[in-house]
Image (cartoon, grey):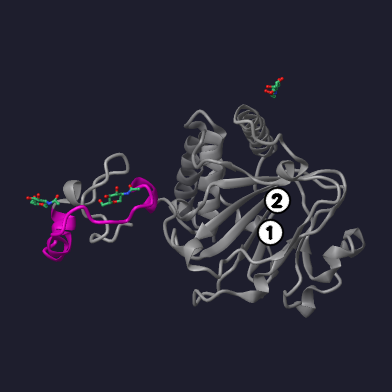
Amino acid sequence: MPKVGHLPFLFLISISLFLRESSGSYAGSASSIINPAKVKQISWKPRAFVYEGFLTDLECEHLISLAKSELKRSAVADNESGKSKLSEVRTSSGMFISKGKDPIVAGIEDKISSWTFLPKENGEDIQVLRYEHGQKYDPHYDYFADKVNIARGGHRIATVLMYLTDVTQGGETVFPSAEENPRHKASETDNDLSECAKKGIAVKPRRGDALLFFSLHPTAIPDPSSLHAGCPVLEGEKWSATKWIHVDSFDKNLAAGGNCTDQNDSCGRWAALGECTKNPEYMIGSAELPGYCRRSCKVC
Ligand SMILES: *[C@@H]1O[C@H](CO)[C@@H](O)[C@H](O)[C@H]1NC(C)=O
Ligand SMILES: *[C@@H]1O[C@H](CO)[C@@H](O)[C@H](O)[C@H]1NC(C)=O
Ligand SMILES: *[C@@H]1O[C@H](CO)[C@@H](O)[C@H](O)[C@H]1NC(C)=O
């Protein structure tokens, strides 16, 4: 028997989806809706997932053009400061796109947060990389071993790697230490993969697809099976965009200029007396105007 009572409810859902899509000047606000049916698990050790069509063509093009203009800007700056000109090394190195730079970038960051269930503030700026023929990224971990690099935001817990172009040959992301799932073995497109990619579980770069993998175990201990590499590009050009996500906020220290200190000897006592909640303007302040007791209030 049909449950008529559910119909008005479904109708309301579709109206609210419609309203979300039509509000806001940029359609990206609607694209923060995540469709779990587009996500495939590619490995459990490490935990790795591919979202097909995570970015639209427009979003891919936008990230590439931002990176290109950033590259041009730094080339000119180099020239003016009399330093060496843009080298081949530099062209393959990363360009960072500051968080929430424009509505499209902010929309992508919203989408990443919705997919990963991790807060936006835990993310670094998106890094865009260009690989030309023969360029690669040797096997490495995304977590750090040293204390300096984890001072801000703590360990990197997860990475979202977005492919901005198709690559004719090569350029796969490979996990050489991944534990092969016997049920997934002998996958469909093995002969499509480069030799490098056959050394582990591999993801072929496809424009708009995104790879999510975790560098830490759920216990927050680094997961060595998250070792990964970018295979050499054999034909074509590869553009990718990376969002590294930390266990804690990556933005906190910024307000204090990376200086997590108390400004008054009494801060510890005040914090113990509950002043952080009673008097947050003075104690914590805002991003523009940091308060006097940020350290004792544990906001940095
Ligand atoms: C770099 O500097 C040289 C000499 O000062 C100048 O001729 C050239 O146009 C500059 N290039 C750019 C890209 O600004
Ligand atoms: C860090 O904080 C201390 C104590 O308030 C201050 O004296 C110092 O100038 C600050 N340093 C920077 C780089 O902001
Ligand atoms: C700390 O706060 C007290 C009370 O507001 C003030 O009298 C004192 O001057 C402050 N000390 C410093 C070093 O700012």
Decide if residue 215 is on the left or right side of residue 258.
right
> Image height check: is 61 above or below 238?
above
Nearest the eye: 113 or 283:
283
Disc 2 crowd rating (10 Å Cα; few below 14, some 14-19, many 20+) is many
State the residue position of label 2: 209
Element class at badge 1: strand
* Residue 42 horizontal/vertical position (percent): 71, 67
Segment colored magenta: 252-278
* Residue 9 horizontal/vertical position (percent): 45, 49
Element class at badge 2: loop
State the residue position of label 1: 50
* Residue 145 horizontal/vertical position (percent): 55, 70
> Image height check: is 17 above or below 293?
above
Circle 2: residue type: Asp
* Residue 164 horizontal/vertical position (percent): 71, 44
Identify the disc placed on residue 157: none
- In magenta segment, residue 67: no
Q: Residue at x 48, y 46 (%)?
A: 13
Q: Quadrant of the C terminus?
A: bottom left
Q: Residue at x 86, y 47 (%)?
A: 133
Decide if residue 38 is on the left or right side of residue 199.
left
Disc 1 crowd rating (10 Å Cα; few below 14, some 14-19, many 20+) is many
Query: Where on the picture, by quarter, is residue 36?
Result: bottom right
Nearest the eye: 122 or 52:
122
Circle 1: residue type: Val
Q: Residue at x 51, y 28 (%)?
A: 25
Do we see residue 2 in this rendering? no
